[in-house]
Image (cartoon, helix red, strand yellow):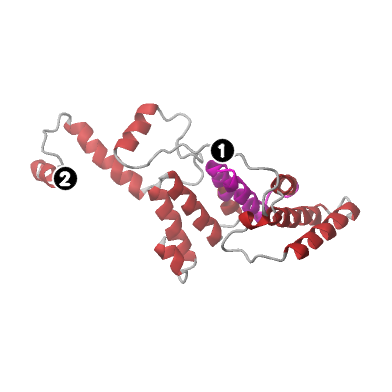
């Protein structure tokens, strides 16, 4: 092809190109990153451990990602229940939830040791209720134990990722969502939450990829199109 025409089409700046090879490489890299975005199996911070600072700076200069620092927010062991309920959840009466926690606790004390699957489900359910009640530390302990017993318990990963978001631990929350999606590839909520997190981190390419996957699975959800 006519290389001078190519330069005229793509050149965005009036100053001359100092290194044609590197200029072309940047165009290629930008296109490649858009067509083949980082996969969920990569480091949750979307920077590999062996990726040099020069490469990261190059990606940031091209506008591929916006690297932002997110410090963990200290969250008390117990917080008001209203803060812990997401907009998608139906808020259950507090009295009913506490009664259910007591029932689950009693059941857990009397479960035979061989019923490990039931124990994991009970712990996950109790952890969910405790999170809604604002008992963050106790909820996290239940969910961690449930996952240690049954590593494929989708609901436990979902609930634990919500707790990590309360602590502003976006990368750790992504880890839980990535694991969840390996188990349940059709989980629309997980794709939407992952998209929200990537957007908050400034990785808009990955955010759009995840919203698009959510739309593919649930094309009737207008909120996802809006996001």
Residue at 81% x, 62% y: name it: 99
Q: Secondary structure at mark 1?
A: loop
Looking at the image, residue 119 sits to the left or right of residue 196; the answer is right
Q: Residue furthest bottom?
A: 220
Residue 76 horizontal/vertical position (percent): 67, 42
Residue at 30% x, 36% y: name it: 61
- The answer to whether residue 1 is visible is no
Query: As displayed, is residue 132 above or below residue 1?
Result: below
Q: Which residue is mark 2?
A: 10
Which quarter of the picture shows residue 63?
A: top left
Q: Secondary structure at mark 2?
A: helix
Residue 208 horizontal/vertical position (percent): 40, 55
- The answer to whether residue 131 is visible is yes
Asked whether 196 or 93 is in front, the reply is 93
Query: As displayed, is residue 1 above or below residue 115?
Result: above
Residue 177 horizontal/vertical position (percent): 57, 50
Q: Which residue is mark 1?
A: 72
| Prevailing secondary structure class for the magenta stretch in the rendered image | helix
């Amino acid at each position: 092809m006519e290389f001078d025409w190519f330069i005229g089409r793509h050149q965005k700046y009036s100053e001359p190109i100092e290194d044609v090879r590197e200029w072309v490489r940047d165009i290629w890299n930008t296109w490649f990153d858009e067509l083949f975005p980082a996969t969920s199996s990569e480091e949750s911070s979307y920077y590999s451990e062996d990726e040099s600072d020069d490469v990261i700076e190059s990606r940031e200069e091209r506008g591929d990602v916006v690297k932002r620092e997110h410090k963990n927010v200290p969250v008390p062991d117990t917080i008001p229940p209203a803060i812990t309920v997401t907009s998608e959840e139906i808020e259950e009466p507090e009295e009913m939830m506490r009664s259910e926690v007591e029932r689950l606790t009693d059941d857990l004390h009397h479960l035979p040791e061989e019923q490990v699957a039931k124990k994991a489900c009970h712990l996950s359910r109790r952890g969910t209720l405790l999170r809604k009640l604002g008992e963050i530390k106790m909820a996290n302990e239940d969910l961690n134990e449930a996952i240690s017993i049954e590593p494929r318990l989708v609901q436990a990963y979902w609930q634990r990722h919500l707790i990590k978001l309360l602590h502003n631990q976006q990368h750790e929350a992504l880890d839980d969502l990535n694991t969840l999606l390996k188990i349940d590839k059709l989980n629309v909520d997980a794709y939407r939450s992952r998209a929200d997190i990537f957007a908050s981190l400034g990785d808009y390419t990955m955010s759009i990829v995840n919203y698009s996957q959510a739309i593919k699975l649930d094309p009737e959800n207008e909120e996802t199109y809006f996001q």
